[in-house]
Amino acid sequence: MLLRAVSVTRCLSMAAILVSASTQALELPLPPPGEDVVGQVQVIKAKYEDTFADLGAANDLGYLEMVAANPGVDAWLPGEGTEIILPTRFILPPGPREGIVINLAEYRLYYYPKGQNVVHTFPLGIGREGWGSPITTARITSKIPNPGWTPPKSILAEHAANGDPLPAYVPPGPDNPLGPYKMGLSASGYLIHGSNKKFGIGMRVSHGCFRMLNHNVLELASMVSVGTSVRIINEPYKFGRSDGKIFLEAHTPLEESGHESVVDKHTAVINALLKDDQFSDLQLDWDMLREVVAAEDGLPVEIAQQGQQAVVHAETQAF
């Protein structure tokens, strides 16, 4: 637990600011070339009536990322005056910074508007087990405000089997599960859309589509156009550079079997480092790396300094 405290302290000392709990769209300036970290961790003091679901909706954060960043805090009754970490600092996903990038492992969408030096990022609900969201490259094929919903046969059958039959068609309105807007994808059968439910954003809740908070989907729809690229990845461990330091951001892997050990996760991180030539000159803080992987709190934490030679292969034996 001591290292865990050190991990959080390091993260907060670099970037945290104390803020009031108010709605704040996550439009963040892109970092300088060669760097990957955006945003700042924020800390608020909870009010009596606050819940993680409400605080997440007010700050463009999903439920599970709020839980991960605040271990030991009651998500439904944090308590008056309790300090709550808002995990609003991110390592940008690997790959091109263009169009829409969805990282399933962090339940989050990134949008890079063309010709602008900013990134917009939003929490997502993604496909639950048995209805997983795809890992693919696609594009936006349609934009439809106030959509109606015709449930596919598979969902009609599922609800009927559970004794909760659905109508053949749900008209636009507050009871429509697609919310106020839907965007079709070239990946057949998948959508980005709003929701008629307050809870579930930032969780595995859908039948494969991507659910957004209603104010978020309206904001995204106002910015993107038909033809916008959509790249869907599954990266639980993200590495990034900032101010001459190397950071690791760890999330719980989606396909975790329940039997995967911390050693297996450490090995996955080390293998990722070994495959990337840009990290060959690192002097890693191995204790911190282990702690970040074990915590899976989604907070970018410094694990190395650049420019100091390290022998990564030898250290992997310690795992």
Image: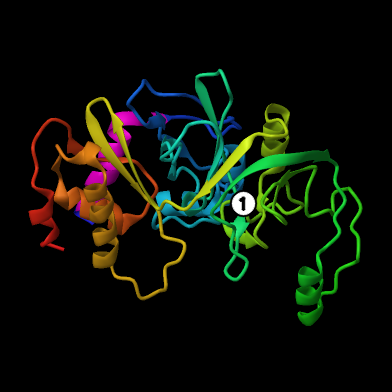
Q: Can you say which quadrant of the picture contains the C terminus?
A: bottom left
User: Mainly helix, strand or loop, the magenta region?
Assistant: helix
- Is 173 located above or below residue 111 in the figure? below
Which portion, as a residue range, is magenta? 3-17
Task: Please state if 39 lies on the left or on the right of 294 as rendered.
Answer: right
Question: Badge 1 local density, few (<14 within 10 Å), some, or many (20+)?
Answer: many
Q: Residue at x 62, y 51 (%)?
A: 201
Disc 1, SS: loop
Check if residue 11 falls in the magenta segment. Answer: yes
User: Which residue does the numbered mark 1 point to in the structure image?
Assistant: 201
Q: Is residue 19 visible?
A: yes
Position in image of residue 57 (x %, y %):
61, 43
Q: Point out residue 151 in the picture as x, y percentages from the top left corner.
A: 82, 63
- Going by the image, does 267 lie left or right of 165? left
Q: Nearer the viewer, residue 25 or 33?
A: 33
* 244 in relation to 275, above or below: above
Give the quadrant of the N terminus.
bottom left
Q: Is residue 294 above or below residue 22?
A: below
Residue at image point 60% right, 56% down:
126
Is residue 51 among what the camera can see? no
Q: Residue at 46% x, 42% y: name it.
A: 81
Numbered disc total: 1
- Which amino acid, mark 1? Ile
Corner quadrant of residue 84: top left
Q: Is residue 105 above or below residue 261?
A: above
